[in-house]
Image: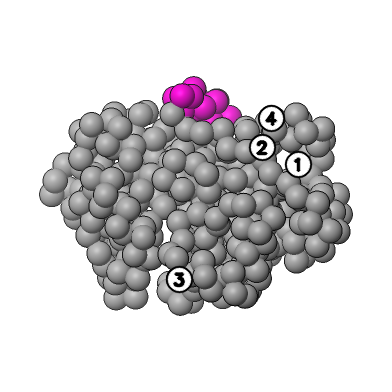
Amino acid sequence: MTSIAMIEAAAERLAGHARRTPLLSSPFLDEIAGRPVFVKAECLQHTGSFKFRGAFNAISALAPDGVIAFSSGNHAQGVALSARMKGIPSVIIMPSDAPVIKIDNTRALGAEVILYDREGEDRDEIGARLSAERGLTLIKPFDMAEVIAGQGTTGLEIAEQAAEAGISQAQVIVPCGGGGLSAGVALALEARAPQMRLHPAEPEGFDDVARSLMAGAIQRNNRQSGSICDAIITPQPGNLTWPVLHRLAGPGQVVSEGEALRAMALAFDRLRIVVEPGGAVALAAALFRPGEGPVIAVASGGNVDRAMMVRALGA
Protein backbone atom coordinates (compact mmCIF):
# COMPACT_ATOMS: atom_id res chain seq x y z
CA MET A 1 0.00 0.00 0.00
CA THR A 2 1.36 3.40 -0.99
CA SER A 3 1.82 5.90 1.84
CA ILE A 4 2.79 9.55 2.15
CA ALA A 5 6.19 8.34 3.41
CA MET A 6 6.68 6.48 0.12
CA ILE A 7 5.68 9.57 -1.85
CA GLU A 8 8.14 11.70 0.11
CA ALA A 9 10.87 9.11 -0.53
CA ALA A 10 9.98 9.22 -4.22
CA ALA A 11 10.38 12.99 -4.19
CA GLU A 12 13.92 12.55 -2.84
CA ARG A 13 14.78 10.03 -5.57
CA LEU A 14 13.34 12.28 -8.27
CA ALA A 15 15.10 15.42 -7.03
CA GLY A 16 17.43 16.63 -9.74
CA HIS A 17 15.90 14.25 -12.28
CA ALA A 18 12.21 15.13 -12.67
CA ARG A 19 11.07 18.63 -13.55
CA ARG A 20 8.99 20.71 -11.15
CA THR A 21 6.40 21.53 -13.77
CA PRO A 22 4.66 24.93 -13.64
CA LEU A 23 1.16 25.78 -12.45
CA LEU A 24 -0.19 27.94 -15.28
CA SER A 25 -3.20 30.24 -15.56
CA SER A 26 -4.92 32.54 -18.01
CA PRO A 27 -7.71 35.10 -17.53
CA PHE A 28 -9.24 33.84 -20.77
CA LEU A 29 -9.66 30.37 -19.28
CA ASP A 30 -11.05 31.85 -16.07
CA GLU A 31 -13.70 33.64 -18.12
CA ILE A 32 -14.75 30.44 -19.91
CA ALA A 33 -15.01 28.47 -16.67
CA GLY A 34 -16.49 31.26 -14.61
CA ARG A 35 -13.92 30.66 -11.89
CA PRO A 36 -10.12 30.67 -11.44
CA VAL A 37 -8.49 27.87 -13.45
CA PHE A 38 -4.95 26.63 -12.86
CA VAL A 39 -3.20 24.02 -15.02
CA LYS A 40 -0.44 21.75 -13.71
CA ALA A 41 1.55 21.29 -16.93
CA GLU A 42 2.86 17.72 -16.68
CA CYS A 43 2.98 17.74 -20.47
CA LEU A 44 6.28 19.57 -19.90
CA GLN A 45 7.72 16.70 -17.86
CA HIS A 46 10.52 14.53 -19.29
CA THR A 47 9.15 12.34 -22.14
CA GLY A 48 6.09 14.59 -22.30
CA SER A 49 4.05 13.18 -19.42
CA PHE A 50 3.86 12.54 -15.68
CA LYS A 51 4.71 8.89 -16.30
CA PHE A 52 8.43 9.59 -15.98
CA ARG A 53 7.94 10.18 -12.25
CA GLY A 54 6.53 6.73 -11.48
CA ALA A 55 8.86 4.88 -13.82
CA PHE A 56 12.03 6.51 -12.51
CA ASN A 57 11.00 6.04 -8.89
CA ALA A 58 10.12 2.37 -9.37
CA ILE A 59 13.33 1.55 -11.23
CA SER A 60 15.41 3.50 -8.69
CA ALA A 61 13.73 1.78 -5.73
CA LEU A 62 13.84 -1.77 -7.13
CA ALA A 63 17.26 -1.58 -8.89
CA PRO A 64 16.49 -4.32 -11.45
CA ASP A 65 18.90 -5.72 -14.07
CA GLY A 66 16.33 -5.12 -16.83
CA VAL A 67 12.70 -4.03 -17.08
CA ILE A 68 9.56 -4.74 -19.08
CA ALA A 69 6.42 -2.65 -19.28
CA PHE A 70 3.14 -2.46 -21.17
CA SER A 71 1.82 0.90 -22.25
CA SER A 72 0.00 2.86 -24.95
CA GLY A 73 2.97 5.18 -25.04
CA ASN A 74 3.47 7.52 -22.10
CA HIS A 75 4.45 4.91 -19.53
CA ALA A 76 6.51 3.27 -22.27
CA GLN A 77 8.57 6.39 -22.81
CA GLY A 78 8.94 7.02 -19.08
CA VAL A 79 10.24 3.49 -18.51
CA ALA A 80 12.50 3.59 -21.58
CA LEU A 81 14.15 6.86 -20.53
CA SER A 82 14.46 5.82 -16.89
CA ALA A 83 16.03 2.49 -17.90
CA ARG A 84 18.47 4.27 -20.19
CA MET A 85 19.40 6.68 -17.41
CA LYS A 86 20.05 3.68 -15.13
CA GLY A 87 21.99 1.82 -17.84
CA ILE A 88 19.69 -1.23 -18.04
CA PRO A 89 17.72 -2.74 -20.98
CA SER A 90 13.97 -2.26 -21.42
CA VAL A 91 11.28 -4.13 -23.35
CA ILE A 92 7.98 -2.33 -23.95
CA ILE A 93 4.72 -4.00 -25.01
CA MET A 94 2.56 -1.44 -26.86
CA PRO A 95 -0.87 -1.64 -28.55
CA SER A 96 -0.63 -1.62 -32.32
CA ASP A 97 -3.03 1.34 -32.48
CA ALA A 98 -0.89 3.58 -30.26
CA PRO A 99 0.03 6.95 -31.81
CA VAL A 100 3.01 6.56 -34.13
CA ILE A 101 4.91 9.33 -32.34
CA LYS A 102 4.73 7.36 -29.07
CA ILE A 103 5.97 4.15 -30.68
CA ASP A 104 8.77 5.96 -32.50
CA ASN A 105 9.82 7.90 -29.40
CA THR A 106 9.91 4.75 -27.28
CA ARG A 107 12.20 3.05 -29.77
CA ALA A 108 14.34 6.19 -30.02
CA LEU A 109 14.85 6.05 -26.24
CA GLY A 110 16.47 2.64 -26.65
CA ALA A 111 13.65 0.26 -25.79
CA GLU A 112 12.74 -2.91 -27.66
CA VAL A 113 9.08 -2.43 -28.70
CA ILE A 114 6.67 -5.36 -29.10
CA LEU A 115 3.23 -4.52 -30.56
CA TYR A 116 -0.03 -6.33 -29.68
CA ASP A 117 -3.75 -6.18 -30.56
CA ARG A 118 -5.79 -4.57 -27.75
CA GLU A 119 -8.97 -6.46 -28.67
CA GLY A 120 -7.53 -9.89 -29.39
CA GLU A 121 -4.49 -10.29 -27.13
CA ASP A 122 -3.90 -10.07 -23.36
CA ARG A 123 -1.05 -7.68 -22.60
CA ASP A 124 -0.75 -9.00 -19.04
CA GLU A 125 -0.16 -12.53 -20.33
CA ILE A 126 2.41 -11.31 -22.84
CA GLY A 127 4.20 -9.30 -20.17
CA ALA A 128 4.25 -12.16 -17.67
CA ARG A 129 5.63 -14.59 -20.27
CA LEU A 130 8.41 -12.29 -21.49
CA SER A 131 9.30 -11.29 -17.94
CA ALA A 132 9.77 -14.94 -17.00
CA GLU A 133 11.64 -15.86 -20.19
CA ARG A 134 14.11 -12.98 -20.02
CA GLY A 135 14.41 -12.37 -16.28
CA LEU A 136 12.98 -8.86 -16.53
CA THR A 137 11.25 -6.90 -13.76
CA LEU A 138 7.75 -5.78 -14.69
CA ILE A 139 7.10 -2.05 -14.14
CA LYS A 140 3.32 -1.80 -14.14
CA PRO A 141 1.71 1.36 -15.54
CA PHE A 142 -0.42 2.13 -12.47
CA ASP A 143 -1.06 -0.82 -10.15
CA MET A 144 2.31 -0.78 -8.40
CA ALA A 145 3.08 0.94 -5.10
CA GLU A 146 6.37 2.47 -6.26
CA VAL A 147 4.76 3.82 -9.43
CA ILE A 148 1.84 5.34 -7.50
CA ALA A 149 4.33 6.95 -5.10
CA GLY A 150 6.25 8.50 -7.98
CA GLN A 151 3.08 9.90 -9.52
CA GLY A 152 2.12 11.22 -6.10
CA THR A 153 5.00 13.69 -6.24
CA THR A 154 2.80 15.63 -8.68
CA GLY A 155 0.39 16.10 -5.79
CA LEU A 156 3.16 17.32 -3.48
CA GLU A 157 4.03 19.98 -6.05
CA ILE A 158 0.37 20.96 -6.50
CA ALA A 159 0.06 21.51 -2.75
CA GLU A 160 3.27 23.56 -2.66
CA GLN A 161 2.47 25.64 -5.74
CA ALA A 162 -1.11 26.27 -4.68
CA ALA A 163 0.13 27.59 -1.34
CA GLU A 164 2.65 29.80 -3.14
CA ALA A 165 -0.21 31.19 -5.26
CA GLY A 166 -2.36 31.83 -2.19
CA ILE A 167 -4.84 29.06 -3.01
CA SER A 168 -6.10 27.46 0.19
CA GLN A 169 -9.04 25.49 -1.24
CA ALA A 170 -9.56 24.07 -4.71
CA GLN A 171 -11.09 21.29 -6.72
CA VAL A 172 -8.29 19.19 -8.26
CA ILE A 173 -9.18 17.35 -11.47
CA VAL A 174 -6.86 14.66 -12.82
CA PRO A 175 -7.05 12.59 -16.04
CA CYS A 176 -7.64 9.00 -15.00
CA GLY A 177 -7.03 5.64 -16.65
CA GLY A 178 -6.03 2.93 -14.18
CA GLY A 179 -5.75 5.51 -11.43
CA GLY A 180 -2.03 5.67 -10.62
CA LEU A 181 -1.77 9.44 -10.95
CA SER A 182 -5.16 10.05 -9.34
CA ALA A 183 -4.42 7.80 -6.36
CA GLY A 184 -0.96 9.26 -5.84
CA VAL A 185 -2.19 12.83 -6.02
CA ALA A 186 -5.11 12.05 -3.71
CA LEU A 187 -2.75 10.62 -1.07
CA ALA A 188 -0.42 13.62 -1.35
CA LEU A 189 -3.29 16.08 -1.03
CA GLU A 190 -4.70 14.21 1.97
CA ALA A 191 -1.40 14.79 3.77
CA ARG A 192 -0.37 18.21 2.45
CA ALA A 193 -3.60 19.98 1.37
CA PRO A 194 -6.56 18.18 2.99
CA GLN A 195 -8.91 21.01 2.05
CA MET A 196 -8.48 20.06 -1.62
CA ARG A 197 -10.37 17.11 -3.09
CA LEU A 198 -9.40 15.11 -6.14
CA HIS A 199 -11.85 14.34 -8.95
CA PRO A 200 -10.88 11.89 -11.72
CA ALA A 201 -11.68 12.87 -15.32
CA GLU A 202 -12.37 10.41 -18.14
CA PRO A 203 -13.73 10.36 -21.71
CA GLU A 204 -17.27 9.27 -22.50
CA GLY A 205 -17.58 5.55 -23.06
CA PHE A 206 -14.49 4.80 -20.96
CA ASP A 207 -15.65 6.15 -17.59
CA ASP A 208 -15.03 3.06 -15.47
CA VAL A 209 -13.68 5.06 -12.53
CA ALA A 210 -16.61 7.49 -12.46
CA ARG A 211 -19.05 4.57 -12.59
CA SER A 212 -17.07 2.69 -9.95
CA LEU A 213 -17.24 5.67 -7.61
CA MET A 214 -21.00 5.92 -8.14
CA ALA A 215 -21.53 2.18 -7.57
CA GLY A 216 -19.07 1.85 -4.70
CA ALA A 217 -17.45 -1.13 -6.46
CA ILE A 218 -15.15 -1.67 -9.43
CA GLN A 219 -16.86 -1.37 -12.83
CA ARG A 220 -15.30 -2.39 -16.15
CA ASN A 221 -15.31 -0.74 -19.56
CA ASN A 222 -17.12 -2.66 -22.28
CA ARG A 223 -14.35 -2.08 -24.84
CA GLN A 224 -10.65 -1.30 -24.87
CA SER A 225 -10.25 0.80 -28.00
CA GLY A 226 -12.05 3.37 -30.09
CA SER A 227 -11.19 6.60 -28.30
CA ILE A 228 -8.79 9.40 -29.22
CA CYS A 229 -7.91 9.50 -25.50
CA ASP A 230 -5.64 6.45 -25.88
CA ALA A 231 -3.41 7.41 -22.94
CA ILE A 232 -6.14 6.79 -20.36
CA ILE A 233 -8.00 3.78 -21.77
CA THR A 234 -7.83 0.85 -19.33
CA PRO A 235 -10.21 -2.05 -18.55
CA GLN A 236 -10.96 -0.96 -14.98
CA PRO A 237 -9.46 0.78 -11.93
CA GLY A 238 -6.40 -0.92 -10.45
CA ASN A 239 -6.56 -3.21 -7.45
CA LEU A 240 -4.17 -0.90 -5.57
CA THR A 241 -5.54 2.39 -6.89
CA TRP A 242 -9.23 1.66 -6.38
CA PRO A 243 -9.23 1.55 -2.53
CA VAL A 244 -7.48 4.92 -2.47
CA LEU A 245 -9.91 6.49 -4.93
CA HIS A 246 -12.91 4.95 -3.19
CA ARG A 247 -11.79 6.54 0.07
CA LEU A 248 -10.54 9.92 -1.12
CA ALA A 249 -11.91 10.88 -4.56
CA GLY A 250 -14.92 13.03 -5.28
CA PRO A 251 -17.37 12.27 -8.11
CA GLY A 252 -15.77 11.59 -11.46
CA GLN A 253 -15.98 14.04 -14.35
CA VAL A 254 -16.81 12.68 -17.82
CA VAL A 255 -16.23 14.69 -21.00
CA SER A 256 -16.77 14.15 -24.71
CA GLU A 257 -14.02 13.80 -27.29
CA GLY A 258 -15.11 17.11 -28.75
CA GLU A 259 -14.65 18.81 -25.38
CA ALA A 260 -11.19 17.26 -25.03
CA LEU A 261 -10.25 18.61 -28.46
CA ARG A 262 -11.54 22.08 -27.53
CA ALA A 263 -9.49 21.98 -24.33
CA MET A 264 -6.39 21.05 -26.35
CA ALA A 265 -6.94 24.08 -28.60
CA LEU A 266 -7.51 26.40 -25.66
CA ALA A 267 -4.39 25.14 -23.87
CA PHE A 268 -2.39 25.91 -27.00
CA ASP A 269 -4.00 29.29 -27.64
CA ARG A 270 -4.04 30.59 -24.07
CA LEU A 271 -1.21 28.75 -22.29
CA ARG A 272 1.05 27.91 -25.26
CA ILE A 273 1.34 24.27 -24.26
CA VAL A 274 0.67 21.11 -26.29
CA VAL A 275 -1.65 18.60 -24.61
CA GLU A 276 -2.81 15.25 -25.98
CA PRO A 277 -6.52 14.26 -25.90
CA GLY A 278 -6.28 12.02 -22.83
CA GLY A 279 -4.18 14.62 -21.06
CA ALA A 280 -6.75 17.33 -21.78
CA VAL A 281 -9.84 15.72 -20.22
CA ALA A 282 -9.24 17.33 -16.81
CA LEU A 283 -8.94 20.78 -18.36
CA ALA A 284 -12.08 20.07 -20.38
CA ALA A 285 -13.95 19.22 -17.18
CA ALA A 286 -12.61 22.35 -15.48
CA LEU A 287 -13.73 24.55 -18.37
CA PHE A 288 -17.01 22.97 -19.41
CA ARG A 289 -18.50 21.54 -16.21
CA PRO A 290 -20.06 23.75 -13.51
CA GLY A 291 -18.20 24.38 -10.28
CA GLU A 292 -17.42 26.97 -7.65
CA GLY A 293 -14.09 28.28 -6.42
CA PRO A 294 -10.63 27.67 -7.86
CA VAL A 295 -10.00 24.53 -9.88
CA ILE A 296 -6.63 22.91 -10.61
CA ALA A 297 -6.52 20.68 -13.69
CA VAL A 298 -3.58 18.41 -14.44
CA ALA A 299 -2.52 18.41 -18.10
CA SER A 300 -1.04 14.95 -17.81
CA GLY A 301 0.61 14.49 -21.21
CA GLY A 302 1.48 16.15 -24.49
CA ASN A 303 2.48 13.28 -26.77
CA VAL A 304 0.14 13.95 -29.66
CA ASP A 305 0.51 13.22 -33.35
CA ARG A 306 0.66 16.28 -35.61
CA ALA A 307 -2.57 15.24 -37.40
CA MET A 308 -4.48 15.05 -34.11
CA MET A 309 -3.16 18.45 -33.03
CA VAL A 310 -4.27 19.94 -36.34
CA ARG A 311 -7.69 18.37 -35.79
CA ALA A 312 -7.89 19.92 -32.32
CA LEU A 313 -6.91 23.37 -33.55
CA GLY A 314 -9.66 23.15 -36.14
CA ALA A 315 -12.30 22.05 -33.64
Q: Secondary structure at mark 1?
A: loop
- Find disc 4 in the rendering and name its residue: 160
x and y percent of residue 95 in the render?
32, 66
N-terminal of the pair, mark 1 or mark 3, is: 1
Number of numbered discs: 4
Is 85 or 117 nearer to us in this picture?
A: 85
Residue type beneath disc 1: Met
Q: CA distance from mark 1 to mark 4?
A: 12 Å
Mark 1 or 3: in front is 3
Residue type beneath disc 2: Ile
Q: Secondary structure at mark 4?
A: helix
Residue type beneath disc 3: Ala
- Find disc 1 in the rendering and name its residue: 196
Do the residues bearing badges 2 and 1 touch, measured as CB atoms within 8 Å? Answer: yes
Q: CA distance from mark 4 to mark 2?
A: 5 Å
The answer to whether residue 281 of the structure is visible from this angle is no
Q: Is residue 132 left or right of residue 258?
A: left
Mark 1 or 4: in front is 4
Q: Residues within 10 Å of mark 3 (few under 14, many from 20)?
A: few
Is 272 or 261 nearer to us in this picture?
A: 272
Q: Is residue 93 left or right of residue 220?
A: left
Q: CA distance from mark 2 to mark 1?
A: 10 Å
* Res 307 label: 3
x and y percent of residue 213 in the render?
65, 60
- Find disc 2 in the rendering and name its residue: 158
Magenta: predominant secondary structure element? helix
Do the residues bearing badges 4 and 2 touch, measured as CB atoms within 8 Å? Answer: yes
Q: CA distance from mark 3 to mark 2?
A: 32 Å
Q: Which residues are magenta?
A: 3-16
Mark 3 or 2: in front is 3
